[in-house]
Amino acid sequence: MNLPNHVAIIMDGNGRWAGKRGLPRLAGHQAGVKRIRSVVKTLLCRGVRFLTLYGFSSENWNRPEEEVHGLFNLLEQGIDHEAAELHSQDVRIFHLGRLYELPQGVQNAINRAVDLTKDNKRMVLNFAFNYGGRIELLDAARRLVEEKVPSADIDERVFNSRLYSAGMPDVDLVIRTGGELRISNFLLWQAAYAEYYFTKILWPDYTPKQVDHALETYSKRRRRFGGL
């Protein structure tokens, strides 16, 4: 089976999952965090080398303060709890987004995990937290200006090297759970030629069997990259 090298997932549907059960939204986010482990394990076993998870967008700051604060706590606790296990599986943890805008505790947890796993080779696991595709492009452009790179020297390779994901391959497959049919400002540059897979299944219910179905669907597609 032809498998993707880089999978990116928009983990959508936590709030609706909780609402259907009469639970607070934060309970949905807790269930969503637990789901990450089985999905990462499945993709790791299938040989996927890069996985990017969209956990908190730059627009999500507009959500209720209590929910945002709860998300930060879940992220901090989740990374501290899972980092050692991911390290034992030879997974390298990386962060995409504006880390400096996050609470100090979250920054510390991410930095600890990144440092612990920096030499691992089996998979790169990107957490896109406080991430926005447009902001990433703006930040890359600002870096080029600050570095005074001559305009004649700026090509796709040079621009790509200033992105948060510099040095990583483009995305092959984007999976979005939760039933929405949009990309929500996610990896606008890196997913320019990605295949998309949308499912109505809410993220906390997204099982390894359904991950395999997305991979099988991808393997049957013919990627053209603008050609015939």
Image (tube, rainbow, N blue to C red):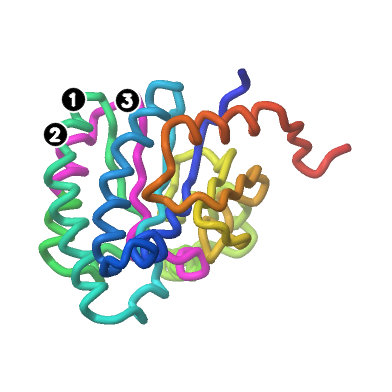
User: The disc labelled 3 sits on which kind of residue?
Assistant: Lys
Position of residue 59 measured from the top left corner of the image (x, y, whole percent): 42, 75
Q: Quadrant of residue 97?
A: bottom left
**Left or right, 72 with reference to 151:** left
The residue closer to the viewer here, 217 or 157, is 217
For residue 121, the mark is 3
> Is residue 20 shown above or below 94?
below
The residue pinned by badge 1 equals 88
Position of residue 57 measured from the top left corner of the image (x, y, whole percent): 40, 66
The residue closer to the viewer here, 110 or 71, is 71
Badge 1: few (under 14), some or many (20 or more) residues near its Cα, within 10 Å? few
What residue is at 25 percent from the left and 71 percent from the top? 101
User: Outermost residue toward the top?
Assistant: 1
The residue pinned by badge 2 equals 84
The residue closer to the viewer here, 70 or 85, is 70
Write down the region rendered in magenta.
112-136
